[in-house]
Amino acid sequence: MLGNESVLPTFGPLARSRAMLELFMDVVLRTRPWRFDPWLVPKGWTPVEAFERPLKVGVQWDDGVVRPHPPVLRALREVAEACRAAAMRVVDWVSLEHEKAWSLISRLYFPDGGEDTVNVIRESGEPMFPLTEWIINQPGVKKLTIQELWAHPPHECARYWPHTAHWNLLDYPAAVFPVTFADPIKDKRDETYTPMNEQDRFNHNLYMPERYVGAPISLQVVGRRHFDEKVMAALKLIEKAMGRD
């Protein structure tokens, strides 16, 4: 909403490697963009060459609201095992009030209650898609449009993304990295699982191994606010532990 930017936009570069991400950050910050945008922190890019002590990695298996699908859980296990084998300390991350965080950020997405979006749709004369209507009827959640030519989940099913939104709310830096691909043999549906709530039940019922064959599975490394360089340094160690250059 113009004039009330509750959730500020930021660059989210897509690259073929971690090195390209670091190059992007370095080049952009060398221009000292804070001279033109007062919202920015006046801080250049200072790469972290090494950690003062062994890296400690917290693994969030779920956020206490919705459990990830089997391929994602397997990716988490594989990365956690690789980190342990590389002498990193791996601990379970206990999620704190993610449902409350989702309630907060969903309202911040639409500080005007979705009025601007609804008006534009009405002016177009086109009908509102069911998922758009569902999202606007939430406490202010914004639906992100996905181009038809991109791979996407089944229509009207993308109802949960707080595994990422929680960090957006806190303004924490994160780096997404590829891990594996969905495999119907390795990632069977857990028929014994009891959903934690209705949202989790909806998400759990979406997973059918045959629909996700070969789907790319990625994870994210999250760090503290303004410690982007440490996120990249941690990702470097994790990728090395996974046997990547």
Image (spheres, helix red, strand yellow):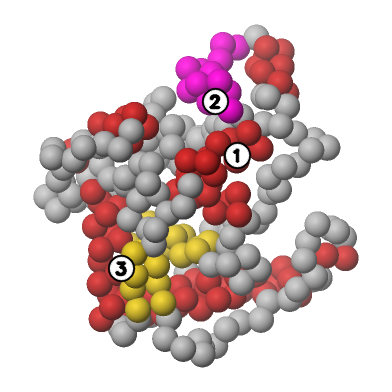
Q: Where is mark 1, residue-wise?
A: 104
Callout 3 environment at 10 Å: few (<14), some (14 to 19), or many (20+)? some
Residue visible at 40% across and 37% down in the picture: 152
Residue visible at 71% across and 13% down in the picture: 123
Q: CA distance from mark 1 to mark 2?
A: 11 Å
The x and y percentages for residue 126 are 60, 12
- The one nearer the camera, 11 or 3, is 3
- Kind of residue indicated by mark 2: Gln
| 143 vs 40: above or below | above
Local SS, label 3: helix
Q: Which residues are magenta?
A: 126-139
Any part of residue 180 in sight: no
- The one nearer the camera, 97 or 45, is 97
Instruction: Check residue 79 in the rendering and tell me which mark sits there, or answer none.
Output: 3
- Kind of residue indicated by mark 1: Leu
Q: Where is mark 2, residue-wise?
A: 138
| 244 vs 15: above or below | below
Residue 127 is left or right of residue 205, and the answer is right
The quadrant in which the C terminus is found is bottom left
* Foreground: disc 1 or disc 2: 1
- Kind of residue indicated by mark 3: Val
The x and y percentages for residue 198 are 34, 29
The x and y percentages for residue 24 are 63, 69
The x and y percentages for residue 46 are 66, 81
Residue visible at 54% across and 25% down in the picture: 138
Q: In which image quadrant can residue 189 be found?
A: top left
Residue visible at 52% across and 73% down in the picture: 232
Instruction: Check residue 226 in the rendering and tell me which mark sits there, or answer none.
Output: none
